Image: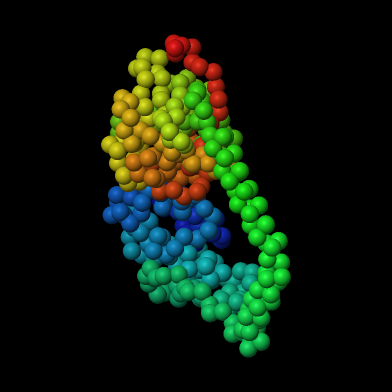
């Protein structure tokens, strides 16, 4: 634990400060992301915690309740964190040690934020987790405005009939363009060769996917992790097995050749990846799915995506690469940078 006591949520004046306080609370508790998930009874998956702590917006109340309890706070302290979260959502700040609330910009002087109906709870009343307030109902539209979409649709149909030949030619051109783009994407797929694999979210930090060890120290086996691109490691060879499907070979100067594999051919999230004997199994095959900035790597046996174990916020050396639900985030986008054949690899 790196503090004498847990941080005070009442000191937070913005959503970003509140999230930062939650991150300090986790460090104070001494719990890793995995132990936190275990302490919550499965209510806080590792990916969820990493995602929330990587943002600057207020988390949901049910997350705050589960997170603070898992960190070891009692019911009264959990209530304080939930009250602080409600006050920030309502646009009020509770002064530390007084229980009094002061208004912030956008308030009408009563503690209620202008344009909303959410008010911070009475400081003397115990707080219980509750769903976030529903969005206000949309304002009623006049009869003329309700008719307007129908009029617009009718006018659009008339224009479409008038210019139908031009539209048809345009659709044909568009389909041809998509076909050409598809062919281009296929042509740009990596060819067999030696590469550095660079996760997009750490491309500016000089980190690549190579061999490392589990950060928790639970095991000492080689794993796929983020390391410095200049560090010594196995040569990585990409071998095409079919259209868009590849085997990722690791050529080690001492251990020989292995294929990157999803642990145990596991189908769920957070399975780690390690080199093992190449047996052409589905959990050793990866579909390279084109993205505008790189490729998604999808294990053929599961259809999920590879990415940093703790998501886009996991930007540090040693971050394990894992099989996760596809999120579209940059940690699940990889770039393949061609490199020379390692000196220890024999030709032929």
Image position of 334 with respect to 276: above or below: below
Instruction: Identify which residue is drawn at 31% across, 33% down.
Output: 281
Q: How many marks?
A: 0
Image position of 108 with respect to 201: above or below: below
Query: Viewer-proximal residue, 19 or 302?
Result: 302
Instruction: Identify which residue is drawn at 51% across, 39% down.
Output: 295
Instruction: Identify which residue is drawn at 36% across, 54% down.
Output: 44
Image position of 44 with respect to 214: above or below: below
Image position of 79 with respect to 47: above or below: below
Q: Is residue 265 left or right of residue 151?
A: left
Q: Position of residue 112 (x, y in %)?
A: 56, 76
Q: Position of residue 220 (x, y in %)?
A: 32, 27
Q: Answer whether residue 309 is visible to the viewer in this image.
A: no
Tell me, what colour scheme is on the image?
A: rainbow
Q: Answer whether residue 248 is visible to the viewer in this image.
A: yes
Query: Viewer-proximal residue, 246 or 243?
Result: 243
Instruction: Identify which residue is drawn at 38% across, 30% down.
Output: 260
Q: Seen from this angle, which residue lies furthest front?
A: 165
Query: Viewer-proximal residue, 66 or 45?
Result: 45
Q: Position of residue 151 (x, y in %)?
A: 66, 81
Query: Viewer-proximal residue, 213 or 322?
Result: 322
Q: Seen from this angle, which residue lies furthest bottom?
A: 143
Q: Quadrant of the C terminus?
A: top left
Q: Quadrant of the N terminus?
A: top left
Q: Position of residue 20 (x, y in %)?
A: 50, 52
């Amino acid at each position: 634990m790196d503090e004498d006591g847990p941080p005070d949520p009442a000191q937070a004046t913005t959503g970003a400060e509140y999230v930062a306080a939650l991150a300090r609370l986790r460090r104070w508790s001494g719990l890793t992301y995995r132990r936190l998930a275990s302490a919550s009874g499965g209510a806080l998956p590792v990916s969820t915690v990493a995602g929330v702590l990587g943002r600057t917006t207020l988390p949901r109340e049910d997350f705050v309740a589960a997170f603070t309890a898992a960190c070891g706070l009692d019911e009264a302290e959990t209530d304080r964190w939930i009250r602080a979260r409600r006050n920030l959502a309502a646009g009020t700040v509770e002064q530390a040690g007084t229980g009094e609330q002061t208004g912030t910009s956008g308030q009408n002087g009563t503690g209620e934020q202008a344009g909303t109906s959410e008010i911070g709870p009475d400081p003397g009343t115990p707080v219980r987790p509750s769903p976030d307030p529903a969005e206000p109902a949309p304002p009623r539209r006049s009869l003329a405005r309700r008719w307007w979409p129908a009029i617009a649709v009718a006018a659009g149909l008339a224009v479409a009939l008038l210019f139908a030949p031009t539209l048809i030619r345009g659709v044909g051109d568009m389909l041809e363009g998509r076909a050409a783009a598809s062919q281009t994407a296929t042509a740009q797929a990596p060819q067999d060769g030696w590469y550095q694999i660079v996760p997009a979210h750490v491309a500016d930090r000089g980190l690549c996917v190579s061999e490392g060890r589990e950060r928790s120290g639970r095991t000492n086996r080689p794993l796929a992790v983020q390391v410095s691109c200049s560090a010594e490691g196995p040569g990585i060879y990409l071998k095409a097995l079919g259209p868009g499907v590849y085997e990722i070979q690791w050529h080690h100067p001492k251990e020989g050749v292995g294929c990157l594999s999803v642990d145990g051919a596991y189908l769920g999230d957070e399975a780690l990846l390690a080199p093992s004997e190449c047996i052409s199994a589905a959990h050793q095959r990866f579909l390279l799915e084109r993205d505008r900035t790189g490729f998604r790597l999808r294990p053929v046996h599961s259809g999920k995506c590879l990415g940093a174990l703790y998501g886009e916020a996991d930007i540090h050396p040693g971050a394990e690469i894992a099989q996760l639900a596809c999120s579209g985030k940059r940690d699940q986008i990889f770039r393949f940078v061609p490199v020379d054949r390692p000196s220890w690899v024999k030709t032929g």
